[in-house]
Image (spheres, helix red, strand yellow):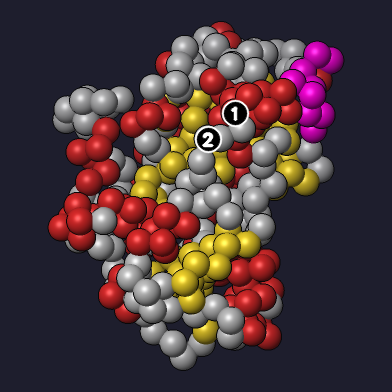
Amino acid sequence: MIRVRSLAVALSAMLLMSTVAACGSGGDDAPKDVSAKTAALGTLTPGVIKVAVQPYAPYTSVQGGRVVGLDGDILAYVARKLGLKVEPEVTDFAGMLAGVQSRRVDITVGGVAWSAERQKQGLFTDPPYYSPPAMAVRSGKTYRTVGDLENLNLGTVEGYVWVKSIQAVPGAKLHAYPDANGVFDDLGAGRVDVGFLDPLLIIAAQKQRPDLKIDTEYLTPPTAAQVKAKPAYQYLQPYQTGFYLPRKATKLERAISVQIDAMYANGEMARLVRKYGGEPKQFLVPAADVATARRGVDRPQDWTPPSIAQ
């Protein structure tokens, strides 16, 4: 997530979503005076946007009934503009997707990667940001290309698609861990040379655990020829994230996308990326294939992805 994880355990996730405790509830807490414009957005409860999230700081976490983190802050800004109250429900990643696809929630956020397969079962907004291929490395070490990774010890979290990419690198040894802490621990101890994790996690770990002496580097994406030769290398390229909604929530999706695009234009998106330690030019400039991936799929042929000025 910015987890590009497998969709296994979908059935168990649906069960989890049906039993998970909400961090807030509609009913008596629902807004009493909802404008006709807000009601027309078609949320499950008028004036409320129910969001499924997984604790995944600094992208999403729930504190005091509020979703905080980069995605949480973006959603909060959009919700204010649309007159909606954000109501979170906590689940796991598969449960987030299942909750949307079964329309038990209005939306899920948290670095969900756009894919042609996922968009068949739900709606994606315009990208709130793009996820660059980030690497955690020991201070003083430099790795720029896929070739630099050959014959190294490479770590990531079990189930992340970077597992497939690492297995495709000649001579590389995969180290897979239950969570990011294992990657950071072994990186700091020298048992791993490079850790593939979501960029803001690496940036946060640099600040919170200076004893590890790690840096954040961004991999030069593999070429089209390299990806053609080794399809698993596609996961070493930047990818577009999106907020994910039920198939029928067309009005809500469009309204949120309009606000996301406005946040690029007015500087708010860049401000939030900086707030969490990211570099706007890494997170808010789309790769060339972002437009072509979605044009004629879930966007018009003339669609232009949002971007900050370069």
Q: What residue did someone put label 1 on? A: 10
Residue at coordinates 50% horizontally, 67% vertically from top-left?
A: 174
Q: Are marks 2 and 1 in contact (CB under 8 Å)?
A: yes
C-alpha separation, residue under disc 2 versus residue under disc 1: 6 Å
Instruction: Name which residue type carries label 1.
Output: Ala
Q: Nearer the viewer, residue 244 or 3?
A: 3
Residue 302 vertical placement versus 43 (above, below): below
Q: Nearer the viewer, residue 249 or 78?
A: 249
Instruction: Name which residue type carries label 2.
Output: Leu
Q: What residue did someone put label 2 on? A: 7
In the picture, residue 32 is in which quadrant? top right
Whole-percent x, y for residue 45 in the image: 67, 13
What range of the chain is rendered magenta? 17-28
Asked whether 168 falls inside the magenta stretch, the response is: no
Q: Nearer the viewer, residue 225 or 18?
A: 225
Residue at coordinates 64% horizontally, 84% vertically from top-left?
A: 189
